[in-house]
Image: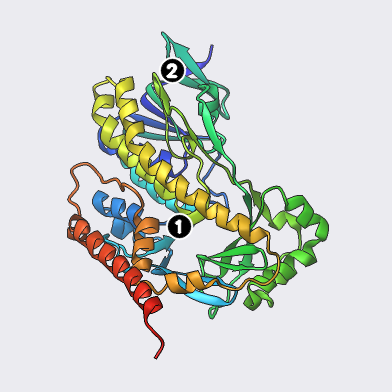
Amino acid sequence: MLNTLRSTCCIVGGGPAGIMLGYLLARKGVEVTVLEKHKDFFRDFRGDTVHPSTLEVMYELGILEDFLRVPHQELHQLVGTVGGFTFKAVDLRHVPMHCKFVALMPQWDFLNFLSEKAKGYPNFALRLEHEVTGLIQSDSRISGVIANTPGGPIEVQADLIVGCDGRNSIVRRAAELPVLEFGVPIDVLWFRIGRSGDDPEQLFGNINYGSVLVLINRGDYFQSGLIIRKGSFEDIKREGLEAFRRNVVRIAPYLASRVHELQDWNQIKLLTVRLNRLRRWYVSGLLCIGDAAHAMSPAGGVGINLAIQDAVATANVLSGALRERRVTESLLARLQCRREFPTRVTQAMQANAHKALEALFRNPGPVKAPWQLKVAVKIPGISHVLARAVGVGVRPEHIAGARRSRAYRNDRMAKFAIALGVAGGFLSVLVMRRKPAS
């Protein structure tokens, strides 16, 4: 007979959605257990762009100052380069949030910080090396999970199971929740390469020679991502590591003195990009959020932040019902309805970005920045609009009962002003085109 644990809420997966939800529920008085299959959070090549929407949640929780003491870099603008044409794509200095920047922080530091805050509540339990292998069903509902642990298999019984175990979710597969898959033309090769103090910060990407190179500043090195055609990694390996290094230098010549650091294919990790979402995020007794409900593309670096928004909404909607042990399917449906809209919009924007990349792959030679791009980046307010899309997102969530910043409360006025700026920009372009030659 298996050992059995009991919790009001059992969260499967100790990623951003799982740890944040555990923390939020614990502070609301809910007994919560988080099961994480690994022995720690240290896994490289995970998303580490903490956007203003997530930093605003930290502010509303009263932990922003502590969070910003954790070593990080701050990115106030996102700069891109297309065929040698450098432009400011995103200007975060005007977003209606307390923090007008993206914080670059390794995900393990982010999760360690949140879990330490959560451990301050006696009703929070984080159990590492607890790998969930299946679900327990009773009376036509999910009532628990089975997990392998260093001490042997156990059962965890709970009023609600929340799957936060990522794009390869065991929970959603065991629950047989149907998935909508959307074709994606890209994969990403992640690797580290040394950084010099005079290197440009170009998180948005370097676009040239049929590829995109993303460089995330981690102090003394870049976490680098080379976007490639889906399924082409084996072909790249057959061409050899020297050809790979030459391609990196062609796109970012300033890396020439450091590209020799790549000595083995084991230093280069393949991220198979997927874009999907569940038709239904729940069944009785079980809910999926974060990547378990909707796998996101790395486009825009919004994955962590969308998962955090899911966790905030879940805590807002369900914490009272969990305390009173009356979580119903109608509440779970309400939560999906709230969070599915921003998911759909974000995935649609990512799919459009993928189409642009697919066109790029068809031209392996030098890229020339199109005139449309050069015109677009000069439109007044366009970098502010993109900043809101990337840094704030669609339907940002807030901690229930928290006082919102004055800037956010006045956001409608800000959006109106930006809209006027964009409209004025388009009108000015039209006028310039119609102006007769002197």
Please tell me the numbered disc located at residue 142.
2
* Residue position for label 1: 49
Q: Determine the residue located farthest toward the bottom in the rendered image.
A: 438
Do we see residue 69 in this rendering?
no
* Placement of 114 over or under 196, stated as above or below: above
Q: Amino acid at mark 1?
A: Thr
* Placement of 260 over or under 405, stated as above or below: below
Q: What distance separates the C-alpha of mark 2 from that of mark 1? A: 34 Å
The answer to which image quadrant residue 208 occupies is: bottom right
* Placement of 315 over or under 111, stated as above or below: above
Q: Position of residue 345 (x, y in %)?
A: 41, 45
Quadrant location, the C terminus: bottom left
State left or right for residue 35 relative to residue 101: right
Q: Residues within 10 Å of mark 2 (few under 14, many from 20)?
A: many
Query: How is the protein colored in the picture?
Result: rainbow
Residue depicted at x 63% and y 78%: 254
Q: Nearer the viewer, residue 376 or 300?
A: 376
Residue depicted at x 36% and y 40%: 341
State left or right for residue 377 relative to residue 368: left
Q: Determine the residue located farthest toward the top in the rendered image.
A: 139
Please tell me the numbered disc located at residue 413.
none
Q: Position of residue 218 (x, y in %)?
A: 52, 65
User: Which of the two discs, 2 and 1, labels the residue nearer the N terminus?
Assistant: 1
State left or right for residue 222 relative to residue 381: right
Q: Position of residue 372 (x, y in %)?
A: 49, 69
Do we see residue 416 in this rendering?
yes
* Placement of 431 over or under 106, stated as above or below: below
Q: Amino acid at mark 2?
A: Ile
